[in-house]
Image: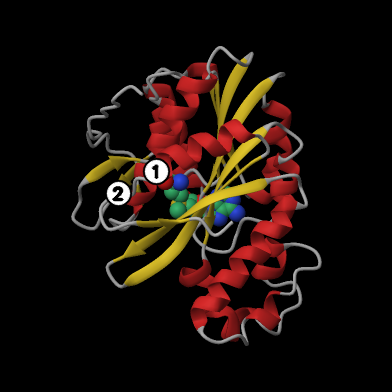
Amino acid sequence: MAKWQLEPPEDDGLVKSKAKLHSEKKHYYLRRYIDAFTTAMKGKWQSICYIDLFAGAGIVEYADKTLTWGSPLIAAQSPVAFDQLIFCEAKKSLHDALFKRTQQLGLGDRAITLKGDANEVCHEVVRKIPNRSLSFAFLDPLGLHLNYETISTLSQAKCDLLVFFPDRVDLLRNWKLNYWENENSNPDLVFGPGADWRHILSVEPKIDQIRQLTTLYTSQVAKLGYEHSRSVRIVGTNGPLYQLIFFSKHEMGKKIWRGISEKGADGQHTFDFG
Ligand SMILES: C[S@@+](CC[C@H](N)C(=O)[O-])C[C@H]1O[C@@H](n2cnc3c(N)ncnc32)[C@H](O)[C@@H]1O
């Protein structure tokens, strides 16, 4: 696999996404997957397409003011190029900055930058995927904001998924106060129809809750024809935060993910719960 060096971005004066340092770990897996996916799939399909529904501004600023590329512009600079990039961002200032950056990088029509709620815009995204494409979608919201219906919409296309699953960082922190009594709460929308996440939250110890919630989620997504592969746990300075879960409908996608995720970034644990 090609060694992919990407120099940090210069400050271009446009709005940036803010993030904590643990985002580096997420980007470590993303870059490795993009590298392996594009290398393996380019030429085998009429086109390869990258989808980023929670895209941010394209440049990320950490608290110490250092800058790094955000996920959409990491994908845009892949040495083996995606034929089409489709981005969505809800926040106008971030969307507009991302759009300008795609222009500055000379991406032209290769990048489509949509503004709006990913859970609504996803229909338009699927319509914009070129015919006979294989797509890879990075689905990286801030919390429980990626609806099951959105995954169902993406599943109409040939599309592998890398999904942010905010078990510790949102679900376990907020269920009592924000979700338990609301029938149409974020976890209800994220887990989808018929998923009884509530009864799992009475299970002890907590580690079993995590395991069962993860299994519930992957079994819901499996109803859409997806199989999951090794999950990566992202840990911050104060402990575990969320998982990245990979889903694909074909063996090749899972094989690529297994290959790149076995080797964790510093201090990362990867485990196979399937
Ligand atoms: C974790 S950040 C994305 C970071 C980006 N993927 C990266 O790695 O550089 C999540 C982004 O999703 C946006 N967002 C939140 N809810 C959204 C929604 N419903 N639809 C689209 N974007 C949303 C936020 O404004 C934020 O920029």
The 10 Å Cα crowd at callout 2, few under 14, some 14 to 19, many 20 or more, is some
Q: Is residue 243 above or below residue 251?
A: below
Q: Specify whether residue 100 is in view.
A: no
Check residue 37 in the rendering and tell me which mark sits there, or answer none.
none
Point out which mark residue 265 bears.
2
From this view, report whether residue 50 is shown above or below residue 84. Answer: below
The numbered mark at residue 29 is 1
The C terminus - image quarter: bottom right
Q: Where residue 75 appears, x then y in whole percent?
A: 44, 31
Name the element at disc 2: loop
| Residue at x 20%, y 51% (from the top left corner) | 65
Classify residue 80 by image quadrant: top left
Q: Amino acid at mark 1?
A: Tyr
- Amino acid type of the residue that numbered disc 2 sits on in the rendered structure: Ala
Quadrant position of residue 181: bottom right
Q: Are marks 1 and 2 in contact (CB under 8 Å)?
A: yes
